[in-house]
């Protein structure tokens, strides 16, 4: 425990949280709205990092899990189910979807696992368009209820959710379970020889990742009031999640959140440049992974641990 | 007749898919890279050809060459700026090189796509066709452009086959895809082989892009779906197998055309996806996959 | 009391039979040595016991419980610990954390570690001698400490059976002594210990019994002395009586500047010293054999010469240094290697493989060379159009050698060409080498553990043992001086 208080990572996270909690006092509703979305993306990325950084499995279609959570919640709400049960249902659906995807996918090695996850997103995208009557198709789903109309409330909900998720996921990553996951990801044969059922642990990691992704997706739907193929279930969303995690620093959990916030903040800050903004953000991300593979967090905590 | 229409249209679309997929699979087979900027490179070729006609008032042939050349240069840039530095970086542990290269090419593709949108807007553009007019094939009115597309695709694939199977350098490249260490031991510099393969890839993607631009038109938004479809075809056919990609391209192309004509154009991508799922479950290495 | 009983164990990989009906028993408080050269099946037997591979047939019985088709994690929990040949640490965790991992239960619910785990991990670390580095990461540790960590992980959960693969590979003599003590400690604990190694001599002092394997089958069993004296074992490992045909060193012209001079070359693979200050030289037209067992360093030496691994020291070819040249340019410069793994192009025909070898020659030269090679290896001519993947092991070996010869090398390096080949093929290869030696001015550097093959053609012999050259001399003196130390 003492080591934790001395680590730079802890203090960066702590200071970051304090700043974030105080922001609504100084900053406009617009920026708060932006950060709200950023925080949800932070959870998407942290959930992805648990799977990649620890279990060593690359999920190319996080949008599949996110979309399951978002659309389940949204569609149910359209039928009159109240908000919180919808959110719960969304998370559960994402977990079920995650298991259905993971069971066969985990038997595949190398790039095939990633490909399967990518295919899942493509299928989901097409299904949404095909069943437009229920899902709103390409135009999108409009959700009758929202979490709150107040920008500050929404901000705090998102922030607290991200902080709590972050703590849980981080604690998991540091726990014995996290250690077993790392072994399963790094060297499954050795992990097996040490007595660990690697498939069981990886499946669990998948379920946890799915749960948080789905939950965040469902919450996001009730914040934005809509969900559509462009905003939530697309390859580009998946790309953003992955880039955020890699950019922030894989295997750190916290880094994924930082990466997500950075990407959205940078995208916004560069908005005056028009279409070039996406270009510049992508270029920066490329430069970071070329020169500092350990990511933003790696730059900030350099020298403390071997990445 | 509908059947003939499907036959003809399907053939042309599949040929285009085949050309695109062949390049994609060659790069994977020889240098182990799943180039996620593939679609962007194709779009770049098409847009460059369009720009040559629109801004520089070049003729159709010259514009096409300009387009292919642009993709070739961009392909080299992809190798030297993104792929090679990541593959040789000592800061990245070996197991993670693949994901870094994937993320890198993804970012690179987005960058190209956004640059195109910035300079030329994201509206759809068509490239000036080299061949115009309509011709009658057994009662089906077919644009000559479409026939031209299919013919060129197959000519290029044929030339590629000849190079790889009949010339010394081509065989060396093929051998490198089977065993890179083997060719090194025989005195071939791998670095030169990699440059050769990226050059071939650049030309293939460039031709595919320009033809697509002539046939159906592109916009900067096409980049993603193009990479996605090349990806699906290559997985279906088997990563690293050129013959697999050719067959899979036709399977996918025809599935799409049949669905579009007989069910609903909006659903045309679904059967291919379902097939992909089935293949992933039953035979993940694809039809002819080796690895 | 029998702890582990292996009965009729068989493992087939497609057409290849790696293990063919192996049976033995392992008692508690006993150390059994499972000995065999590369390709004998000893590592496969170990993997079968540990559940890393599933047996095609046979039983693996631990204290009466049948484990033959269990996944490895179940076997481990039942009471078997394994030390792999190559260390497998978790690089981002400290030594303490690595050992703690070995102590964790296979549970999904543990969020907090049991304090017992920490205490126990420290005890184990102390036992194997890692207390002083317990908070360091594997990347900072010397080779021997990494091996200690493997031992620690293996015994962490107090297994009844301990499997150790090549316990002394890469260790200095002092370290070997310390490790022997640790392993003896396991025996004293009452555990059943199975050591797998390729060299009877190195484990002779440690084991109670030896079980010798060759080509997947048992060829001898008994005390170390019995096994070392066994006729079959001696023939198979040492190669029987040897006729030599050496030319004295003085007959070679380039006495002052040998064609190839390897000067104090050392190679480090991560932490392991693969080569240590090795000095060899080869004269133009000479046939030099480097004799050594698996892991001695032959392949590393050849890879250093071919430019495939970085090394310290100097390698001079025709007087000028090879440092900094690409492997392909070294090959074009006349040093052609026939590697242990053959590295053929599996989906290309025999003819295509050969043509690629001749790609730097002009058409006429290539055709002439091809003719000569078909004369040397007639079977390749008849199988010209066949795809390389479908050739037998012996034919593939001939193809690899022929392909290398297509390059008209000045120095031909052969790395373990006899590996896994049947005796009748060895005859063929031997004759081909003989012809090569007599009809061409080619220089050959041969690396072999099969002495019957290595000695008859050699002018000079080096013995490479544990990364060092320990003997140099003419082949007729080998049996007398180096042979006894060899088995």
Image (cartoon, rainbow, N blue to C red):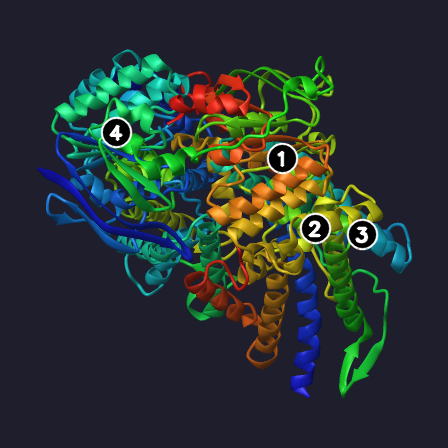
Residue bearing the label numbered 3: B67
Q: Residue lying at the far left in this picture: please name it.
A: C1
Q: Quadrant of residue A282?
A: top right
Task: Between label 3 and label 2, give the one nearer the viewer.
Answer: 2
Residue bearing the label numbered 1: C337
Asked if residue A276 lies left or right of residue C238, the reply is: right
Alpha-carbon span between mark 3 and mark 2: 53 Å
Residue bearing the label numbered 2: C375
Residue bearing the label numbered 4: C224
- Report whether mark 2 lies on the same chain as mark 1: yes
Alpha-carbon span between mark 2 and mark 1: 21 Å
Image height check: is B280 above or below C1?
A: below
Asked if residue C181 lies left or right of residue C476, the reply is: left
User: Callout 3 environment at 10 Å: few (<14), some (14 to 19), or many (20+)?
Assistant: many
Q: Quadrant of the N terminus of chain A?
A: top left
Task: Between label 3 and label 1, give the one nearer the viewer.
Answer: 1
Tell which circle, 2 or 1, labels the residue nearer the N-terminal end.
1
Tell which circle, 4 or 2, labels the residue nearer the N-terminal end.
4
Position of residue A135 measured from the top left corner of the image (x, y, whole percent): 43, 64
Chain under callout 1: C
Task: Between label 2 and label 1, give the one nearer the viewer.
Answer: 2
Image height check: is B212 above or below C114?
A: below
Label 4 with label 2: CB-CB less than 8 Å = no
Residue drawn at (50%, 65%) of the image: B273
Q: Secondary structure at mark 1?
A: strand
Q: Quick one: C245 or C138, which is closer to the camera? A: C245
Task: Between label 1 and label 4, give the one nearer the viewer.
Answer: 4
Position of residue C13 measured from the top left corner of the image (x, y, whole percent): 39, 54
- Report whether mark 3 lies on the same chain as mark 2: no
Task: Between label 4 and label 3, give the one nearer the viewer.
Answer: 4
User: Callout 2 environment at 10 Å: few (<14), some (14 to 19), or many (20+)?
Assistant: few
């Amino acid at each position: 425990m003492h080591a934790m208080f001395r680590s730079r990572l802890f203090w960066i996270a702590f200071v970051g949280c304090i700043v974030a909690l105080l922001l609504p006092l100084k900053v406009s509703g617009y920026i708060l709205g932006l950060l709200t979305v950023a925080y949800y993306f932070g959870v998407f990325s942290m959930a992805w990092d648990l799977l990649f950084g620890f279990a060593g499995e690359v999920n190319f279609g996080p949008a599949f899990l996110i979309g399951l959570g978002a659309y389940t919640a949204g569609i149910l709400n359209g039928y009159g189910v109240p908000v919180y049960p919808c959110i719960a249902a969304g998370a559960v659906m994402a977990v079920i979807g995650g298991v259905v995807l993971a069971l066969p996918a985990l038997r595949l090695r190398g790039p095939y696992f990633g490909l399967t996850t990518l295919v899942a997103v493509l299928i989901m995208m097409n299904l949404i368009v095909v069943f437009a009557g229920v899902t709103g198709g390409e135009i999108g789903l409009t959700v009758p209820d929202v979490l709150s109309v107040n920008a500050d409330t929404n901000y705090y909900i998102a922030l607290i959710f991200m902080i709590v998720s972050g703590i849980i996921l981080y604690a998991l990553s540091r726990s014995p379970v996290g250690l077993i996951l790392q072994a399963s990801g790094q060297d499954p044969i050795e992990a097996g020889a040490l007595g660990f059922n690697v498939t069981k642990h990886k499946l669990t990691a998948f379920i946890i990742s799915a749960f948080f992704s789905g939950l965040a997706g469902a919450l996001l739907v009730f914040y934005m009031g809509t969900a559509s193929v462009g905003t939530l279930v697309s390859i580009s969303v998946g790309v953003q999640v992955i880039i955020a995690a890699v950019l922030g620093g894989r295997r750190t959990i916290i880094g994924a959140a930082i990466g997500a916030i950075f990407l959205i903040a940078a995208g916004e800050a560069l908005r005056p440049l028009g279409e070039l903004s996406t270009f510049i953000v992508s270029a920066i991300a490329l430069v970071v992974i070329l020169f500092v593979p350990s990511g933003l967090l790696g730059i900030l905590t350099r020298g403390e641990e071997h990445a | 007749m509908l059947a003939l229409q499907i036959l003809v249209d399907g053939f042309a679309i599949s040929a285009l898919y085949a050309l695109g997929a062949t390049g994609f699979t060659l790069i994977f087979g020889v240098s182990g890279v799943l180039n996620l900027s593939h679609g962007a490179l194709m779009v770049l070729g098409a847009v460059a050809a369009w720009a040559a006609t629109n801004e520089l008032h070049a003729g159709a042939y010259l514009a096409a060459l300009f387009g292919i050349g642009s993709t070739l240069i961009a392909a080299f840039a992809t190798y030297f700026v993104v792929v090679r530095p990541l593959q040789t970086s000592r800061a990245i542990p070996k197991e993670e090189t693949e994901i870094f290269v994937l993320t890198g090419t993804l970012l690179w593709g987005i960058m190209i796509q956004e640059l195109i949108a910035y300079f030329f807007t994201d509206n759809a553009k068509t490239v000036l066709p080299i061949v115009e007019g309509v011709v009658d094939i057994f009662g089906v009115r077919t644009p000559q452009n479409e026939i031209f597309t299919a013919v060129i695709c197959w000519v290029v694939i044929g030339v590629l086959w000849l190079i790889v199977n009949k010339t010394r350098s081509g065989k060396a490249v093929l051998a490198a895809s089977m065993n890179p260490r083997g060719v090194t031991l025989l005195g071939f510099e791998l670095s030169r082989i990699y440059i050769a393969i990226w050059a071939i890839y650049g030309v293939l993607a460039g031709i595919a892009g320009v033809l697509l631009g002539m046939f159906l038109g592109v916009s900067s938004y096409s980049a993603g779906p193009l990479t996605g479809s090349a990806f699906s075809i290559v997985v279906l056919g088997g990563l690293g197998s050129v013959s697999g990609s050719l067959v899979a391209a036709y399977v996918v192309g025809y599935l799409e055309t049949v669905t579009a004509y007989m069910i609903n154009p909006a659903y045309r991508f679904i059967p291919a996806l379902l097939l992909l799922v089935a293949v992933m479950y039953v035979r993940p290495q694809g039809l002819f996959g080796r690895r | 009391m029998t702890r582990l009983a292996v009965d009729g164990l068989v493992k087939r990989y497609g057409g290849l039979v790696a293990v063919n009906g192996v049976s033995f028993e392992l008692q508690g408080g006993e150390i059994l040595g499972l000995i065999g050269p590369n390709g004998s099946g000893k590592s496969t037997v170990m993997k079968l016991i540990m559940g890393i591979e599933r047996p095609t047939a046979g039983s693996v019985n631990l204290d009466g419980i049948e484990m033959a088709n269990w996944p490895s994690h179940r076997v481990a929990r039942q009471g078997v610990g394994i030390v792999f040949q190559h260390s497998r640490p978790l690089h981002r965790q400290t030594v303490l954390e690595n050992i703690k991992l070995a102590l964790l239960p296979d549970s999904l619910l543990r969020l907090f570690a049991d304090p017992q785990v920490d205490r126990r991990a420290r005890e184990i670390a102390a036992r194997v001698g890692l207390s002083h580095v317990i908070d360091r990461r594997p990347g900072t540790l010397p080779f021997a400490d990494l091996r200690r960590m493997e031992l620690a992980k293996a015994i962490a959960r107090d297994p009844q059976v301990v499997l150790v693969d090549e316990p002394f590979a890469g260790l200095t003599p002092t370290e070997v002594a310390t490790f022997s003590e640790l392993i003896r400690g396991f025996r004293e604990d009452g555990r059943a210990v199975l050591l797998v190694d390729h060299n009877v001599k190195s484990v002779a002092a440690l084991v109670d019994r030896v079980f010798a394997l060759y080509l997947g089958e048992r060829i001898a069993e008994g005390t170390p002395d019995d096994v070392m004296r066994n006729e079959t074992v001696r023939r198979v490992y040492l190669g029987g009586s040897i006729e030599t045909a050496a030319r004295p060193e003085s007959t070679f012209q380039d006495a002052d500047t040998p064609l190839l001079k390897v000067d104090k070359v050392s190679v480090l693979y991560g932490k392991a010293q693969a080569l240590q200050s090795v000095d060899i030289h080869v004269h133009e037209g000479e046939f030099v054999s480097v004799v050594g067992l698996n892991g001695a360093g032959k392949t590393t030496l050849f890879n250093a010469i071919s430019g495939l691994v970085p090394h310290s020291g100097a390698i001079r070819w025709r007087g000028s240094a090879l440092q900094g040249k690409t492997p392909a340019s070294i090959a074009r410069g006349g040093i052609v290697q026939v590697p242990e793994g053959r590295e053929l192009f599996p989906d290309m025909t025999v003819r295509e493989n050969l043509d690629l070898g001749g790609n730097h020659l002009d058409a006429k030269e290539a055709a002439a060379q091809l003719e000569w090679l078909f004369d040397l290896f007639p079977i390749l001519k008849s199988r010209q159009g066949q795809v390389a993947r479908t050739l037998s092991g012996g034919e593939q070996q001939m193809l690899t050698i022929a392909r290398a010869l297509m390059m008209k090398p000045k120095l031909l390096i052969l790395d373990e060409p006899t590996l896994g080949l049947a005796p009748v093929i060895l005859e063929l290869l031997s004759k081909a080498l003989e012809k090569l030696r007599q009809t061409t001015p080619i220089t050959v550097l041969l690396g072999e553990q099969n002495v019957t093959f290595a000695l008859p053609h050699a002018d000079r012999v080096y013995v490479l043992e544990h990364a060092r050259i320990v003997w140099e001399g003419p082949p007729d003196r080998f049996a007398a001086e180096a042979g006894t130390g060899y088995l």
